[in-house]
Amino acid sequence: MDAQTFLKKLDSIPDIPTLPTIVIKVNKMLQDHDTSIKNLSKVIEKDQGMVAKILRLVNSTFYGFRSRITNIPHAVIILGFNTIRNAVVSVSIIKTFSGEKSFEGFEIKDFWRHSVAVAVTSRYLAEQTRLDSPDDCFVSGLLHDIGKVVLSQDFTELFGLVWKSVKEDGLSFYEAEQKLLPVNHAQIGGHLAKKWQFPGSLIDSITYHHAIRKGVSNLNQLLIVHTANNMVNSYQSDSDMRPDFSSIDPEAKRIMSGQLETISDWFPSIAAEIESACEFFLKEE
Ligand SMILES: [Fe+2]
Ligand SMILES: [Fe+2]
């Protein structure tokens, strides 16, 4: 099976995760410059679960506002359209992809913990370097590996092959995919993001997070997510805090040299932030 056939097959799966209507609507509204705060708020207010979650999020330490935000129009005014969109996307995607259908040994909770850690780290890198919007980088980090979930749920056999090779041959997930599959999780995730009509920078950051492509629309965002993913992975595998950055792209190393050099100073301190983001996003209602 070649890559094209694989992605065609992916398109034909009947229960391929469709996004909740609220995400599609909010996304569409933000592409339309005439959208008013009132109209956007109305769409969100139709989903009371979402309202509660958004209000909890904007009032959490995550955004650090002092005054209490009690309704959606107020939240939109304070945080802006883009941040609200990102919050709606984050909350909905995690909910959509936390189903019970899972592969043995591949825990969806662990998957989301990794994703949240990469999201928080991406946001931090964006804040420090000012290379891109921290908020957009958070969402990119959160979704970078979404293709893995689809692979584990809808291509169980192929996922099994990769998983076995990871365990037995000591390969990384990506290396095993390169060896065994026609496409990798990054391409699968990017394909879905395109189908969901996500912004181009998000599609590219998902698609190329393991194999940097210089001509993308937002190279900075891609490099940030790529670097954050490597940082999180090497810190998780090396408890002695001697991280291995050999697979980070040279250009990423150059523009984030300051953050890479000082990682042992700041990484432990964002661990608490990762913890509270996990607490917020992964808590079951
Ligand atoms: Fe990945
Ligand atoms: Fe990852």
Image (cartoon, rainbow, N blue to C red):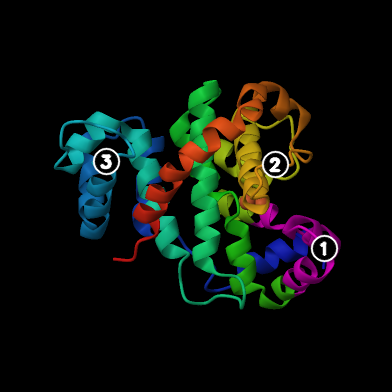
- 131 lies left or right of 133: right
Q: SS of the residue at dot 2? A: loop
Estimate how packed mark 3 is, as few (under 14), some (14 to 19) or many (20 or more) residues with alpha carbons within 10 Å: many
Q: Tell me where residue 150 appears, x and y as whole percent.
A: 59, 65
Question: What is the span of residues highlighted in magenta in the rendered image?
Answer: 161-188
Tell whether circle 1 marks a residue whose Cβ is less than 8 angstroms from ligand 1.
no
Residue plotted at (49% across, 65% down): 109
Assign the N terminus to one quadrant of the image. Answer: bottom right
Residue 243 circle label: 2
- Per the image, the residue denoted by label 1 is 2
Q: Tell me where residue 275 appears, x and y as whole percent.
A: 42, 50
Residue 11 circle label: none
- Per the image, the residue denoted by label 3 is 58
- 78 lies left or right of 19: left
- 121 lies left or right of 5: left
Amino acid on which disc 2 is placed: Pro
Amino acid on which disc 3 is placed: Val
Proximity of marks 3 and 1: CB atoms separated by less than 8 Å: no
Q: SS of the residue at dot 3? A: helix
